[in-house]
């Protein structure tokens, strides 16, 4: 129990207050004071006008005039505070924007440092080598896919279509009895020789034209 209640909780690190933060705080405090002063002056102007009206009703024209002169002076001060408020607001805005720009620059510095480390780890030569390896891998895969798909070249496909058209041109194909496909080595040799003969006939036909 003693350890449970007696253990001190770790304190969170206090946020660092910069000179810019202090300057912004002071400017905002001055701005708030000026706004409070303006409210006070506006209230006083209404009272001075009422007093001047009352003095005129009592026939005290000089005193009423003096009160209105005081009111006019306070109105000029009010106009000056408007200009000061504009300046304070601009300073606060500029300082806050400067802080944002500073954070952006810090972020860019961190990003550039991280990017430089990546460039150091992976050079241009490494990228080119990886691209070459990838390209070779794609070519090998394409060759494997072609073999698995039958491995026929375009010329082989043309021969197949020519033979198919020849069979179709002979007429009725419904009752044609197809020979058994040879599976031995002799059958493979026969097909190779027949294929070579068709190629030779095609070459002779081209030469004759």
Image (cartoon, rainbow, N blue to C red):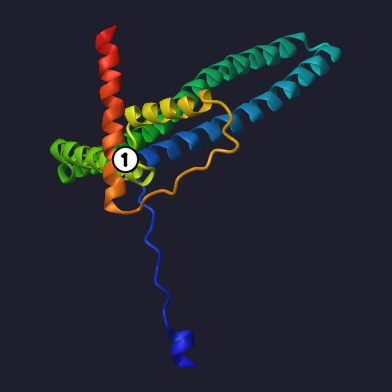
The residue under label 1 is 191
Most extreme residue toward the top, as rendered? 209
Q: Position of residue 161 (x, y in %)?
A: 44, 27
Q: Which of 92 and 204 is in front in this view?
A: 204
User: Which quarter of the rendering shows the C terminus?
Assistant: top left
Residue 151 appears left or right of 48: left
Most extreme residue toward the right, as rendered? 57
- Rendered image quadrant of residue 59: top right
The answer to whether residue 111 of the structure is visible from this angle is no
- Rendered image quadrant of residue 190: top left
Q: Nearer the viewer, residue 69 or 101?
A: 101
Label 1 packing within 10 angstroms: few (<14), some (14-19), many (20+): few
Q: Is mark 1 on a helix, strand or loop?
A: helix
**Residue 76, above or below 137:** above
Q: Residue at 77% across / 9% down in the picture? A: 61
The answer to whether residue 158 of the structure is visible from this angle is yes
Residue 160 appears left or right of 147: right
Q: Where is residue 121 in the image (x, y as percent from the top left)?
A: 17, 46
- Rendered image quadrant of residue 105: top left
Q: Where is residue 185 in the image (x, y as percent from the top left)?
A: 27, 52
Q: Where is residue 44 in the image (x, y as percent from the top left)?
A: 69, 25
Q: Nearer the viewer, residue 78 or 143?
A: 143
């Amino acid at each position: 129990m003693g350890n449970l209640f007696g253990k001190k909780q770790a304190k969170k690190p206090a946020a660092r207050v910069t000179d810019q933060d202090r300057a912004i705080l002071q400017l905002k405090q001055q701005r708030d004071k000026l706004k409070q002063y303006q409210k006070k002056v506006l209230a006083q102007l209404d009272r001075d006008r009422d007093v001047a009206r009352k003095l005129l009703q009592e026939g005290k024209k000089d005193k009423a005039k003096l009160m209105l002169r005081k009111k006019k002076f306070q109105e000029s001060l009010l106009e000056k505070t408007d200009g000061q408020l504009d300046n304070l607001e601009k300073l606060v805005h500029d300082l806050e924007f400067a802080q944002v720009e500073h954070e952006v620059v810090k972020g860019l510095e961190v990003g550039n440092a991280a990017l430089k480390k990546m460039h150091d780890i992976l050079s241009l030569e490494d990228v080119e080598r990886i691209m070459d390896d990838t390209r070779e891998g794609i070519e090998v895969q394409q060759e494997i896919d072609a073999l698995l798909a039958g491995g026929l070249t375009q010329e082989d496909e043309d021969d197949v279509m020519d033979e198919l058209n020849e069979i179709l041109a002979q007429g009725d194909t419904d009752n044609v009895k197809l020979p058994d496909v040879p599976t031995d080595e002799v059958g493979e040799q026969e097909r190779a020789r027949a294929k070579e003969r068709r190629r030779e006939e095609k070459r002779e036909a081209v030469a004759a034209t």
